[in-house]
Amino acid sequence: MIRNGLNKCLQNKLFNNKLFYSSQAKPSRDSSYAIINNDDIEHFKTILDTHSILTDPSDIDGFNQDWMRKYKGNSNLVLKPKTTDQVSKILKYCNDKKIAVVPQGGNTGMVGGSVPVHDEIILSLSNMNKIEKFDPVTGVVVCQAGTVLETIENYLTPMGYTVPLDLGAKGSCQIGGNVSTNAGGIRLLRYGSLHGNVLGVEAVLADGTILDCLSTLRKDNTGYDLKQLFIGSEGTLGIVTKVSMITPPKPTSVNVGLFACQDFNQVKTVLSRAKSQLGDILSAFEFMDRPCIDLVLKHQQVQDPFQEKSPFYILLETSGFNETHDSEKLNNFLESIMAENLIIDGSLATDSKNISAFWKFRESITESLGKEGAVYKYDLSLPIEQFYSIVELMRAKFDDKANVVGFGHVGDGNLHLNISTPKKPYSKEIFDMIEPFVYEYTSEHRGSISAEHGVGLMKPDFLHYSKSNNSINLMKSIKNTMDPNNILNPYKVLPTK
Ligand code: FAD
Ligand code: 2HG
Ligand code: ZN
């Protein structure tokens, strides 16, 4: 049961102990939000069955804490609707009462967007997990927002289709969360972003209005493309309840190469050669530096595929439909990059077991970092010329005080800079060594301070490094129009000042 007295006391405790999720302190609770009481719970019981209302702290704990165990909220209530109509009724009530709400998908986000900052209600989409329609001719799939990404992939595979999005969190993240963060991942290079692949969205607005933009059309130029507002707005403009998405045919011939390079210039040159020589069969081009490999070897049950250590590694994937044609193209490419001494070592995987083993090196970096202690994550878009220098600059700054690693979707210009220290909690001193330096560097080179993870709670105060004042003001006015009471995911994305 909700106890108002306890709630207040916990809030006061949080106010007094300043928590740092970046070099900026956690924002204070906005006292204009209502504190939920038993009447509210009774009202929610008229909308949802009792199993879909969680009030026991031990049931709620996992929803309050993010995947990295960096962000922790203090919600007393989780609601798990099963239908769009239920979401609509919940939001209408919350809007009328000015109760703040945080939408939550698989809770795998990396910027603190999916957990409450204070006592916001958690609206979990995980009970809305049905795949509603699939058209085997067009490849368009329609599903509820809480469907887990991997479930969609497993559903499509026997029909010869694949999801145009793939990421390490596929077993937990939900399509609604992917859309809301505009997740990038390892297939963006081949299939493009969700802004292109999502054909339609059904969303519930803050006042409970159900917005049906669930088109399944490839082409529709009838005015403003409203669905785009929900792609990447991190639950601040509405709750995504359904998604329609174009899915491509699943490639039948896949090869994965893991190559070692002596310096980052080689990585750059191999990328440009891969684009021109492999063309349409190039489906992933990822890179990781040696400290990443060391971390994976330390924390996972894997063996180093290389005899000698090299500073950089490339994971390159080709996917197509004609094995002979693909192998020939790949072999020609490999011969030419070896002849030019662009790689110093490497091996190729063509069967699914070895392919998965190679991908494990790339996909388990995040999990391995998490086992180290406190991890300071930066997800940057940078021009290729300045791409790796920021890792070197940070390494020089930290010396042996922290482990600085760089990896990511180099084919898309997206660097994951991670700095880890053996001990939690997160330290203001370490944040101050990184921020705003990393953001200034990124801005100076006209990069983005969030390539794919979003802004969440981590970066609202730094948004100006990537967005002009006029853009931020327009974003604020869109937010104000769509959510005038600011009940949806408060404290996130937009700067308060
Ligand atoms: P959550 O974490 O639950 O939520 C994320 C945000 O979306 C929050 O602001 C939340 O409020 C909002 N939200 C969630 N569902 C809805 C909804 N239905 N309606 C409105 N708002 C909603 N990201 C990448 O881009 N590329 C990667 O390669 C990648 N790899 C990852 C690997 C690992 C191991 C992990 C843990 C994370 C990775 N991520 C990656 C982070 C990525 O953002 C998420 O994995 C994913 O897109 C979020 O989906 P989710 O369902 O977990 O959303
Ligand atoms: C990835 O590409 C994810 O693996 C996570 O986006 C990146 O841990 C990170 O920094
Ligand atoms: Zn990534």
Image (spheres, rainbow, N blue to C red):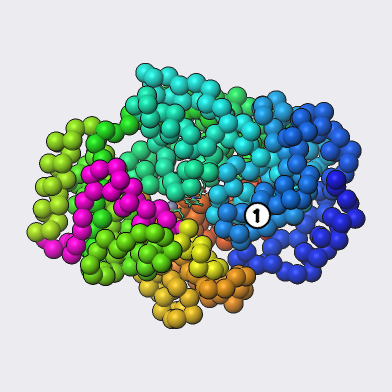
Return the residue nearer the eye: 492 or 146: 146
Where is residue 217, by image quadrant?
A: top left
Q: Residue 402: percent from the left, percent from the top?
A: 48, 76
Q: Residue 471: percent from the left, percent from the top?
A: 56, 49
The stretch drawn in magenta includes residue 342: yes
Residue at figure coordinates x 87%, y 44% from the top left: 37
Question: Is 380 displayed left or right of 23 in the figure?
Answer: left
Q: Quadrant of the C terminus?
A: bottom right
How many residues crowd mark 1 within 10 Å: few (<14), some (14–19), many (20+)? some
Residue at the spot of label 1: 65
Q: Amino acid at mark 1?
A: Gln
Q: Which residues are magenta?
A: 340-366
Q: Is residue 19 above or below residue 488?
A: below
Q: Residue 158: percent from the left, percent from the top?
A: 37, 26
Q: Does the Cβ of the disc 1 residue fall within 8 Å of ligand 1? A: no
Q: Is residue 477 visible?
A: no
Return the residue nearer the eye: 58 or 324: 58
Q: Residue 30: percent from the left, percent from the top?
A: 78, 54
Return the residue nearer the eye: 27 or 122: 122
